Amino acid sequence: MLAADLKGKSVLITGAGRGIGAGIAELFVAAGAHVALNDIKVPPAGSPAVSEGGDTLWVAGDVSKLESVEDIVEQVEAWRKIDVLVNCAGIAGELAALHNQSVDAWQNVIDVNLKGTYLMSQAVARHMRQRQSGAILNIASITGLTGFPASNAYGVSKAAIVMLTKTFATELARYRIRVNAIAPGVIEAPMLGHMTGGKDGTSAIVRRVPLGRLGAPYDIANAALFLASDAASYITGVTLPVDGGWLAFGGAGDASREEGVVSAS
C-alpha cells in the first residue's frame, strides 16, 4: 500500500501564515516536502509559521492581484519546480444581512477567496502543463455546500471554489494534473470567532457537530496530505468535507448527544 507522503515534492501553499495554512505547511514539511509558503506579508521571526524547519521558502504577496501572483509563482519556480499548489489564502469578511451588506466588502471577499484561487491555479497550471504532472488542492468550506444565513460573500465564494475544482479537474486531467478540494467544517483557527460571533456562538455550533468538538488545523492538514500525495493518484474533481459530521446531521437537538436523536419507531 502506498503511504501518503510528499518526499521530494515541491509545494506552494498560500495563506500559510496562520490557521489551516500554517497547519498544512507544518505537516507537509514533516512529510518530506520542499515547501514554499505565501501570505500577504511574511510573518515575524519566531512565529510558528516561520519556525517549522525543513526546506522552506517564504514569499509575500497578494493572491488577488495578477502581478503579485505572477511574481509569487516566478520566485517559487526559480527556487523549485512546483509539484503541488494548495490554495488556502482566504478571508471571512463580514456576516451581514443582504439589505445591509457593503458591496465593497462583498467584493473584497470574492477577490481574495475566489479570484485568488483562480489566479494562482492559472499561473501554476501553466508550468504543470509543460511538465505533464501536478496536483492542485483548493480549500473550500461547508458554507459553500449548504446555506448559512448572512454568508453572502464567504459562502458564495466557497461554493464557487467547489465548481472551479470540478471545471479545473476536467480540463487539466489530460495533462495529468489532479484538482481536488477540501471543505472544512468549524475549525479552531483565527477567523473562527469572527464567523461565529464569539464564545456563545461557537459553543452553539460545537453542539451542532456530531463528533462533539471543533476541528483543528491538523484535521484539514491530514486530509490535504492524502489528496496532495500520489496515494490519491486516481482522485480528481472531488470536494471532501472534513466537518465532524456536520453535513450528515439532519436531526433535532444537539447532534453529539443522545437526547438529540429522534426515534423513528
Image (spheres, rainbow, N blue to C red):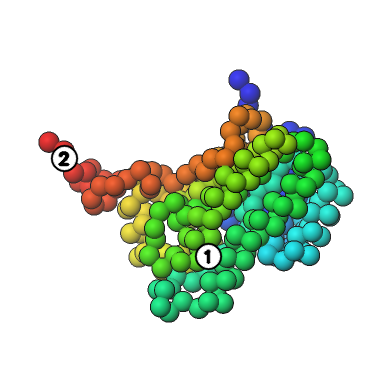
Label 1: how many Cα within 10 Å (few below 14, some 14–19, many 20+)? some
Q: Amino acid at mark 1?
A: Ala
Residue at the right extreme? Answer: 78
**Is 231 in front, or is 210?**
231
Residue type highlighted by circle 2: Ser
Q: Which disc, if any, is residue 263?
A: 2
- Return the x and y of residue 9 as percentages of the image width and height: 75, 37
Q: Residue 70's spot in the image, x, y percent? A: 79, 59
In the picture, measured across the screen, residue 227 lies left or right of residue 202, that is right
Q: Quadrant of residue 170 in the image?
A: top right
Q: Residue at x 75, y 60 (%)?
A: 69
- 150 vs 252, left or right, is right
**Rendered location of residue 127, percent (x, y):** 80, 45
- The furthest residue to the top: 1
- Write down the residue under mark 1: 92
Q: Quadrant of the C terminus?
A: top left
Q: In the rendering, which numbered label is found on residue 249?
A: none
